[in-house]
Image (spheres, rainbow, N blue to C red):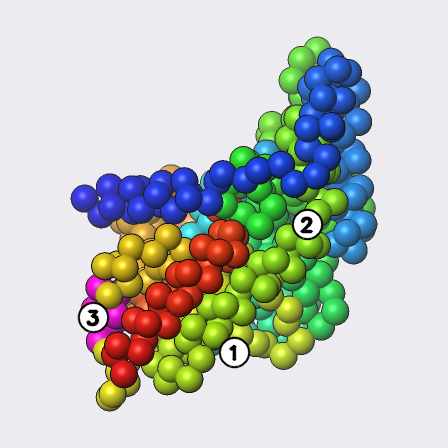
Amino acid sequence: MLQETFTESYIDAEKKLSNRSTQGNELVYLKQVLDSGNLSSLMGGTFTPRFESQFSELTGSKYAVAMNTCMGALHSAVIAAEAGAGSEVICDSVYIFGAMAVLYNNAIPVFVDINPITHNMDPDKLEAAITERTKAVIVTHAWGLPAEMDRILAICRKHHLLVIEDCAEAVLARYKGQYTGTMGDVGCFSFQASKQMSLGDGGMATAQDENLHKQLSNFAGAPTFLSVAYSLDYNYRINELTAAVGLARLETLPQEIERLRENATYFDRAVLGCDWITLQRGPEGAEHSFYYWAANFIETKGGPTLEAFSHAVEEAKLTTISVGDTKIAAYQHPLIKERCAAAFADERNKNCIIRYEDGVCPVAEKTVPRIILGDTVAPQEVVCKDADILHGIIQKFG
Ligand SMILES: Cc1ncc(COP(=O)(O)O)c(C=O)c1O
């Protein structure tokens, strides 16, 4: 039942968002690919390398490897960290994706609590979770807001840990002037249907180090035919059609991010002055790229209950606003809680920290069901209409 509810609401949300029209040169580039007959970069296609180099240039990353999904990029990053069975990888406690990539490689995810205002990993909680088995830290930039990277990086460098940035929701976000995906060792981006830059599906792994770049490239382009396999690589490569649309989308991405930022201001105004809703903002020096506008519902003496507020939002049938996200912290997903992955039965993980009981990350548990999300990707008129209705709901509660 729980699974059905998740799946239905997810599909509903994705349907609303996945209908992206042509914004620039998409059709021109697609025709060039089809006319060339090279649908894969393996066959001499040129759009994949162009997409990669344009992405590097735009985000200030030294290297970029185009992939078929962000999950492929995350998995590749975990392999590059040499985090296999017997290893722990630290993840934040809102998102499940990093933990899934860790489990793909038979390592164990260890969850660290979040800061309730930023929804991102709390650097104050990080060091206590590091053990001699820790190989890497996966930091998600929640909803497009960069995590407090300088403090996280300082801790990770001290302990020689690989830093993987999950930038699936944070393309062109910046922290203290640096783009997401360039601060850690590997950045993982998603071009899945709902994301700021939608290609239907697609991903990118960025790296600053040549050796890491080589490893990531292997994962993106494992041997397919007539080639000898020397290592266990994966077929996570992108195809030329997707890369061509990606190249076109990159040309208009900065304007698209500005549009999302403007849409976020309408949601900001809708909640202005409400003392039981606080915005997801900070840390100092962070520039949000608004995959979603996000805020927190706070129980106060004079305000509504969470139930009453959620009910009012549901009744209004808004297409862009939802309350509560998944309603649970990452380790409360049945996959983790019920230990439904081979890694949990692997003898080599017997010394790893496997603590997934309720209460492990109390801030995430309390925050996630109270997260209010506003879809900034929707057209401006829809955002304005829904923001007005949200404002009306808030006024009604006085
Ligand atoms: C934070 C985060 N990480 C990873 C992913 C996975 O992205 P993909 O579908 O491209 O594999 C998503 C997609 O929803 C995401 O939001």
Res 304 visible: yes
Magenta residues span: 305-311
Query: Disc 2 marks which amino acid?
Result: Leu
Label 2 SS: helix
Indicate whether 313 appears above or below 49.
below
Question: What residue did someone put label 1 on?
Answer: 124
**322 relative to 256 in the view: left or right:** left
Asked if marks 1 and 2 touch (Cβ < 8 Å), the reply is: no
Which quarter of the figure has residue 246?
A: top right
Residue at position x 48%, y 73% in the image: 268
User: Picture coordinates of residue 380 (x, y %)?
Assistant: 52, 56
- Nearer-N-terminus badge (1/2): 1
Question: What residue did someone put label 2 on?
Answer: 253
Res 364 visible: no
User: Picture coordinates of residue 298 (x, y %)?
Assistant: 33, 79
Residue at position x 33%, y 62% in the image: 323
Question: What residue did someone put label 3 on?
Answer: 308
Q: Residue furthest bottom?
A: 301
Residue 108 or residue 29, whichever sits in front: 29
